Structure formats: structure tokens, C-alpha cells
Amino acid sequence: MTGPDTTEPTVPPSPRSAKRRLMFVVLAGFLAIIGTLVAGYYFAMRIESLRIAVGPANSDDLKVAQTLAQAFSTQKSSQIRLRLVPTDGAVASAQALADGKADLAIIRGDLEVPRNAQAVATLRKNVAVLWVPPQPKVRGRKAAPKITKVAQLAGHRIGVVGRTQANVNLLKVILQQYGVDPAKVTIVQFPANEAVEAIKSQKADAFLAAGPVNSKITTDAIAASTRDGGKPTFLAIDLADAIAQNHPAYEASEIPAGSFGTDRPEDEVKTISFTHHIVARRGISESTIAAFTRQLFAIRQSLKNEFPLAAKIETPDTDKDATIPVHPGAAAFVDGDEKTFLDRYSDFIWWGLMALSAMGSAGAWFAGYLKKDERQTNTSQRERLLDMLRTARQCDSIEELDRMQAEADDILRDTLQCYEHGAIEQGTLNAFNIALEQFHNAVADRKTLLMSMPQTLQRTSAQFRAAGTA
């Protein structure tokens, strides 16, 4: 004899567990898509900090950048913040942008522009101002010939306001256009804050300053040139058009009469000009620079009263042949083609919804596939119940009737589970209830009949049926 079989029957996977796993997968996919959309919106609307290289210290460029940074930080709707990166001047600022140490930079248009620089805005236009102070009257000494033209500067001392080499290069461009060898003049440079003292000390015969028409540094320097009732002589750059043709970074321009005082100059003076630009590093996203440009011009008017230089900010040149190519984000703002959040991410949203719809369809198909198995199982169980109904009406064993009734209870439990899972409809459940009721009635009637028969008659009937079956 062998011992009892202790091997447990294999339990088939529960349809309810499979459905739960399916619902978990669908819910996880839905949350993933919603999370992606929310993260995308946060990424697009988050506050970004841009580094702007500017210098030198105490310059107008630095003051403008500080004013803009403060204004950006106080605006609640501002998406852009500015972080200043102080430098020694425009050359160092351009290098910081080229090296990737800054996202934005304020540079001079007449200097070498980094290859990765793209224009965002024109900060201001600067003009070159050449003037000669009145000669001091010295008793007993014959006055030197008066300088009235640029070509007469050969052999003289020329003072350049500002320490930057760019202003010296500007002077050399002007002199060369007039045929004056820069080696035949003495160039003296001094800081902007020492300009007034240098002029009063007569350290040069003529002076050059470069800056906005309303520059306080230039105005104070010219005012210091007035002595003994004499007025400074402004030297016109009549060959400005030729200089602009030979050097695209410069433009022909004019200094309006009275720009530096009531009669300084008395008449309009022809000169050359160049611009200071706000440039961005190529590779910064179009949406970021578009937001910066939008904020820049939104606050420009509100700042002009307290900081007049802010009113000089202009939109960049968007022509294809511009000296500095415009950044796509700034061009989008200028041309009115700036994309909204939906414009930029509509494709991602559409594909996300399509993916969500596809996941829903796949989930519905898979759920239907699982229900198909349950429906097939329920159909076979219902057929089994009908077979048991036919068997119960002819059964001669109360034990067999009890076994079939226990099996019917199991079939009932599985059928109710199928109904809960949505595998069968209400009509199918009603039909099953009718069959189950008929089965129970048949079992009850058969048990009543068997219990009323004598035991010998039951055994004879069972043997007769067994023989008939054989």
C-alpha cells in the first residue's frame, strides 16, 4: 500500500488577479503620460537664469545690465533671471561667450564677434567725437596753426578717452582713411574718470571719445575743453561713407547740433558710428531667448525715466546679410512668430493622447481576451450543470446526489465571479439561475423518492441500472 497522495492540485491563475495586473499596467501608463505632460509644461514655463558677461566696472554697459537684472527679478511673471558675469571690457565679454562661460554678452560691433554669437538686441549706437580744444593765449608766443580737419592731425598728440584698445583702433581707422600714418601721431590714453583732468592739463592737442550722443562722459570732457571763452572745434569725418564701405562694422552718422551743450556743436557734424549688441550663445533654446527678448522690450519703456540709456535699446537686424546673425528666438519675437506653449508642444501632446488611446484600446482588447476565457469556462460549466440535471433525475445514490450538489455550488461560485468580472451578461446569469433551480428541484425530488423506497428495492434498482448500462 502506498501512502495518501499529498500532492496539492495545481491552482489555475485567477482571472481577477490578471485583471488587476492589467488595470495596474493601464493606470501606470496613464499616470506616466500625464506626468510627462505636466513635466513638459513645468520645463517650458520654469524660471531660467541666464549669465550675461558685461564690463568694465562703472561703465554704462554694466549699469544697463544691473538695471535689467533688477527689473527682471522684481517681475512676478518673469521667466528669465539675469546673473551678471563682470569682465574687463567688451573683448573679455566676447571671449567669455566664446568659451561658454556666459549665455549672453554685451559686445562692441566693431570688434571681432565670436562665431557662436547671435544678435538679440541693439543696446545702443555710439558715435565717434573728434574735437580740438581752443588754444591757450600765451603772451609773446605766436599761436600754432589751428586744427580744423582730420588730415591736419599728423605730428600732434591725440588723447583717447577710455582704456580700451578698441577706441585706439577706431582712431587709427579714421586717420588711415585720411592718409595720416598713425605712427606720426602720439596717442595718449587715459581712463574715462580722468578725462576732465587730462583735458584741463592740456595733455593732448585733440581728443577722441566714443559713446552715445548723450553720454555724460563725453559731455563733461567737451565742457572741460572750454577755456578763456574759447569754444572747442569739432572735426567732421567727411569720409564716413568710405569708412563704412571699407569697414562694415561702422556706419555713417551725424552728431546733431547742441548734443553736448547749447552750442556744442553749433552745426550738425558728420561722423561714424558703431553699435553695442546684446548677443546670445548659439545653442540656447529658441523659446528661452524669445522669452528674454519679450521681457527686455516689455520693461524698456518703464525704465527709460530712471535710466535713459534703456530707451536706446532696439530690435536686432533680422536681415540675412546682417553683420551679426540674429538668434532665431529674437527673430521670432521681432517677426511676431513667437510660438506659444501649445505651438511648441502640440505634437508631443497629440502623440501622448494617441498613445493613451492606444493603451486604452489594447487594455480593452486584453480585458476582452481574459473575459473570453471566463465565458468559455462558464459555458462548459453550464453544460455540465445541465448534464447533472439529467443525471440527477435517474440517480439511485444519495451520496452521488450530494456530490453533484457540491459541484453545483462550485459552479455557482465561479459563475458569480464571471458576472462580477463582466464576462457574462445579466441575461446569461438569469438563464443560469433557472437551470440551477431546476437542478436543485430535481435533486430534492430524487432524494425524497429514494428515501421513501425500501433499501432492498434501492439496491435492486441500482443493480438493474448498472446491468443495463453494461
Image (cartoon, rainbow, N blue to C red):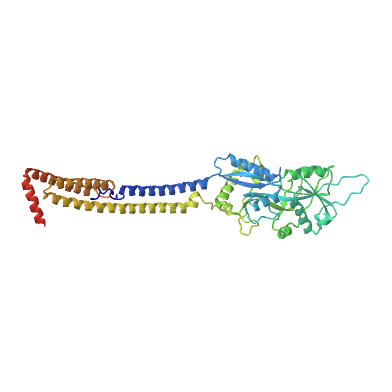
Q: For the C terminus, give its image quadrant.
A: bottom left
Q: Residue at x 21, y 45 (%)?
A: 409
> Which residue in the rendered view is the most extreme toward the front?
1
Residue 261 at least partly seen: no
Q: Residue at x 82, y 56 (%)?
A: 183
Residue 128 at least partly seen: yes
Q: Is 454 in front, or is 1?
A: 1
Residue 250, x across and y down, in percent: 71, 55
Q: How many marks?
A: 0
Q: Is residue 302 left or right of residue 144?
A: left
Q: Is 375 in front, or is 248?
A: 375
Residue 362, x across and y down, in percent: 36, 54
Q: Is residue 107 left or right of residue 72?
A: right
Quadrant location of residue 139?
top right
Q: Is 320 in front, or is 421?
A: 421
Residue 138, x across and y down, in percent: 90, 45
Q: Residue at x 44, y 47 (%)?
A: 34
